[in-house]
Image (cartoon, rainbow, N blue to C red):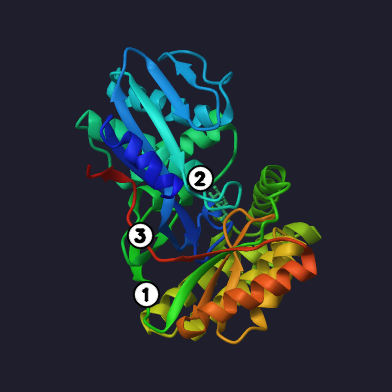
Amino acid sequence: MTELSAWLAEHRSGGRLFFGPGRVNLIGDHTDYNGGLVMPFAVDMGVYLSSAAASSWQFHSAGYPDVAYRSGDSIQGLPDWARYVAGVISLAEARFGPLPPQKLSFFSNLPTGAGLSSSAALQMAVLSCLLEMNQLDMSVADKARLGKQVENDIIGVPSGIMDQFISAGGVVGSALQLDCATLEYQAVALAHADYQLLVVDSAQPRTLAASGYRDRVAECASALAALQQIKPASHLVAYQLSDLDAAQLTDSQYKRAKHVIVENGLVDATAAALAADDWLAAGECLNQSHRSLRDDYQSSHLRVDELLAICAQQPGFVGGRITGGGFGGCTVQMVKANALETFIASVSEQYRSQTGLEAHFYPVSASAGARELSQ
Ligand code: GLA
């Protein structure tokens, strides 16, 4: 019996069950907070939540001390994971009025700290539970806005809206091409009999992820301010590469803005390649995106670069890139389905002998957004 099935067996009869998925971003990183395009998909790993009526809010997660919370209490003193939970409750109560307290028990089968957005999974599991238990409704965009507000204002990370949007609105078999300025989106079919999507975790913890992320957000804001001197626009993605030469940019402002503009174009190119069923062309977009993140955005990590270099030498490799916030963690790759087994065995062995690290491999497919699970 896996840990998950043991947890489900224990909680199945005790209350209602909910699930918030983690996400993989196929392409379009560090574009969301620059008003650009992203193309994430939800996966079937995520946060499970069992909810039962209680006299006050209680949060329970195996391996952590239990947390008691009363509506209106300060959230700042709680442990990190519980701040996400209490933050969602508090913003949902601000919108809908007081909600009856629950005992919430959590289980996650996402690799931790790997960049598959366990925090959005946690937030959307809680929100879907609060809405279903109280017969309330919110649009996907509003759910995502609420989650982003928790992340920005309560946790204090200046993230974009991608992770919460896809965890709330994931579609089976498709990635979503989302315009983060308007929140308009279209589903892009993401399944092919000849190819497998594979997440490979470098096992390199995402060191500097929080501070590096903050620095990049600030660098983009300052690049935008410099570009606005030559031409008004509200987002970096509105500029062309040729505008960068006309503006007075520092070297790092230039590189960050270049990445954002190039990456935004690559999202469109990937959507076009997938629509044409051309996974080789889509894979090349992923490779180009990785080079841009590595060289211009400088949000990769040496270990992740080494991992991708090993992957690129294997038969069956189609394309791959670091995914999510970066600075370590996971890659997303496209691999020929008939080469998958030997690909995993060779990469695992070569990466171990080169770095001493144990890579983890997760074949994935696009799955549904946060939801109640049938009993
Ligand atoms: C993190 C953030 C997202 C997004 C990605 C990078 O996952 O939470 O909003 O900015 O990094 O694309």
Image position of 337 (left or right of 203): left
Type of amino acid at the residue the image marks with label 2? Ser
**In the image, is residue 105 above or below residue 107?**
above
Question: Residue 348's spot in the image, x, y percent?
Answer: 65, 70
Question: Residue 116's spot in the image, x, y percent?
Answer: 53, 53
Type of amino acid at the residue the image marks with label 3? Ser
Quick one: which residue is furthest to the front in this view?
Answer: 1
Q: Which mark is residue 191?
A: 1
- Asked if the residue at label 1 sits under 8 Å from ligand 1, the reply is no
The image quarter containing residue 352 is bottom right
Q: Earlier in the sequence, mark 1 or mark 3?
A: 1
Categorize mark 1 by other alpha carbons within 10 Å: few (<14), some (14-19), many (20+).
Answer: some
Categorize mark 2 by other alpha carbons within 10 Å: few (<14), some (14-19), many (20+).
Answer: many
Q: Give the camera-side residue of 193 and 185.
A: 193
Residue found 39% across the figure and 18% down from its top:
57
Residue found 56% across the figure and 44% down from its top:
159
Q: Secondary structure at mark 1?
A: loop
Residue found 74% across the figure and 63% down from its top:
303
Question: Residue 368's spot in the image, x, y percent?
Answer: 32, 56
Label 3 belongs to which residue? 367
Residue 223 visible, this angle: yes
Q: Earlier in the sequence, mark 2 or mark 1?
A: 2
Q: Which mark is residue 118?
A: 2
Question: Residue 166's spot in the image, x, y percent?
Answer: 40, 53
CA gap between label 1 and label 3 equals: 11 Å
Q: Give the camera-side residue of 158 and 241.
A: 158
- The tally of labels here is 3
**In the image, is residue 346 above or below residue 69?**
below
Q: Secondary structure at mark 3?
A: loop
**In the image, is residue 261 above or below residue 62?**
below
